[in-house]
Amino acid sequence: MRLTQYLMDLFESELSEPGFEMGSPKDDSKRGEPIIPEHQEYARICKAVNLEDHS
C-alpha cells in the first residue's frame, strides 16, 4: 500500500492541475490497488494518443 500511496501523491501533485481526477476511492479500505485517472476530455485524450505514431 505504500507504493499505492506514493502513486496517489504523485497523481495529485502532477495530474490534478491539468484537470485529471482520481476515479478510485482515496480511502484504502474502499480501494484495491489500482489508481484510475478520469478527465472530462478522456475520449479526446485517448483518441490523440492512439493517433500518435508509435513506431
Image: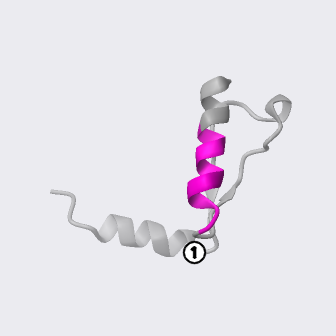
Q: 7 or 47: nearer the eye?
A: 7
Q: Residue at x 71, y 53 (%)?
A: 23
When asked about the image quadrant of residue 9, the answer is top right
Q: Is residue 43 above or below residue 15?
A: below
Q: Is residue 14 magenta?
A: yes
Q: Of the residues shown, which amino acid type is indicated by label 1?
A: Glu
37 in relation to 3, above or below: below
Residue 10 spot, x, y in % from top left: 58, 45
Image point (84%, 29%), residue name: 29
Between residue 27 and residue 30, name the one nearer to us. Answer: 27
Q: Residues within 10 Å of mark 1 (few under 14, many from 20)?
A: few
Q: Which residues are magenta?
A: 7-17
The correct choice, above or below, for 3 with respect to 35 in the image is above
| Horizontal arrangement in the rendering, residue 17 relative to residue 24 (left or right) | left
Q: How many numbered marks have been drawn onto this rendered protein structure?
A: 1
Regarding residue 35, the answer to whether it shows in the image is: no
Quarter of the view holding residue 55: bottom left
Q: Left or right of 55: which side holds 21?
A: right
Q: What is the quadrant of the N terminus in the image?
A: top right
To which residue does mark 1 refer?
41
For image coordinates 63% across by 69% down, the residue present is 19
What is the residue that sits farthest to the top in this orientation? Answer: 1
Question: Residue 16 lies in magenta, yes or no?
Answer: yes
The main secondary structure of the magenta stretch is: helix
- Badge 1 marks a residue whose secondary structure is loop
Measuring from the top left, give residue 2's x and y in whole percent: 65, 24
Give me the residue at 56% from left, 68% from top: 42
Nearer to me, 3 or 35 = 3
Q: Is residue 54 visible?
A: yes
Q: Position of residue 39 (x, y in %)?
A: 62, 67
The reply, left or right, for residue 52 in relation to residue 13 is: left
Q: Seen from this angle, which residue lies furthest front? A: 13
